[in-house]
Image (cartoon, helix red, strand yellow):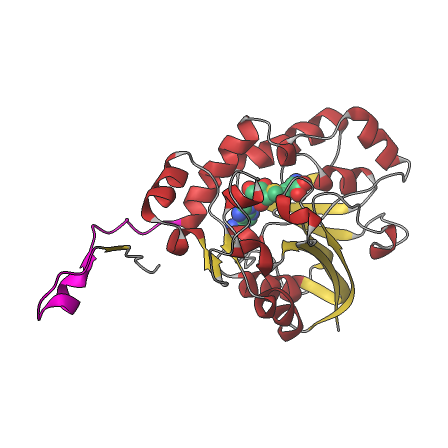
Amino acid sequence: MDARWIFALVRPSIGSDRKKRGRVLAAPVPPVDARAHNRAAWDLLSRSGDRWTVPVDARTVERARRGEWSVQLTNTKPVPRGWFPPDMRDVEILALASGGGQQACIFAAAGARVTLLDNSPEQLAKDRLVATRHGLELRLEEGTMEDLSRFPDASFDLVFNPISVIFTRDARAVWREAARVLRSGGALLAGFVQPVAYLFDRAALDGAAPLAVKHKVPYADERDLPREELEARLGRREPLEFGHTLTDLLGAQLDAGLQLVAMYEDVFGDATLDEHIATQMATRAVKR
Ligand SMILES: C[S@@+](CC[C@H](N)C(=O)[O-])C[C@H]1O[C@@H](n2cnc3c(N)ncnc32)[C@H](O)[C@@H]1O
């Protein structure tokens, strides 16, 4: 992992060695292990009942058993039912970074054979709880989405990945691995945040600061946040995010051998940017 050094800009001194003294190397922020940090961060979110960590209830499971279900890849819109096979029985699904007792349990109740891989033990525990409570079969795997080496090539009909590549440096690796584990004719259904959202501070998106362009894309909290903000975020155990380019979000799916066949856009639902532009996207891409 790269060591990230944060430079403190100080007022340049007048004199011949001005350049040398103008930029002073501050104490380095220790390199961040993003995976370990985000595991702890999502464990904490899961314990505190964040929206993406609330398990489905008995009624939702019962309805899914009768074939009445819907799931989300983004914040507000349901995934079109036509993105899934008409009959979910025995469809092999990899629910990738989908922990929290939600989509994986719904797929299992609908009759699919589901493997769930997530980086957070607390999120996985929610799925275990729902599965035990309702007699659902789920294979649970703790791991990181860029490394699916535990699964052989061509082992799934569907890979379902709700917004989560924002928590990894390497979105390309996620699509590459997803394509590898898909069977020919299988599909990757993915949700992600469009790059434009990362031009703005989180405070601006929350309405606590003006919507002014502040960052560049590709963006990484660990590299681009001012040092105090990064330290505060690490201290509060908030997830670290990465703002990827469209080349890495869409082009890399094509490079991985997938063909984009459908997409839609969505809003955050609670961000100031929503009134200007939808900044989430869902794609359906088929392995040739
Ligand atoms: C926004 S939640 C999505 C799951 C949720 N059930 C939903 O409704 O969309 C993001 C999930 O990604 C997982 N995650 C974050 N980084 C990950 C990584 N590197 N590998 C696998 N899962 C990861 C988190 O633990 C969390 O469960």
Residue 24 versus residue 79 in the image, above or below = below
Residue 282's spot in the image, x, y percent?
Answer: 72, 56
Viewer-closest of 100 and 163? 163
Query: In which quadrant will I find the C terminus?
Result: bottom right
Name the quarter showing ligand 1: top right
Q: Is residue 28 magenta?
A: yes
Residue 139 visible to an observer of this rendering? no
Residue 55: name its quadrant.
Answer: top right
Viewer-closest of 166 and 217? 217
Residue 194 vs residue 20: left or right? right
Residue 127 versus residue 71 in the image, above or below = above
Residue 249 visible to an observer of this rendering? yes
Q: Main secondary structure of the magenta part?
A: loop
Which residue is the extreme one toward the left? 16
User: In this picture, which residue range is highlighted in magenta?
Assistant: 11-33
Residue 179 versus residue 203 in the image, above or below = below
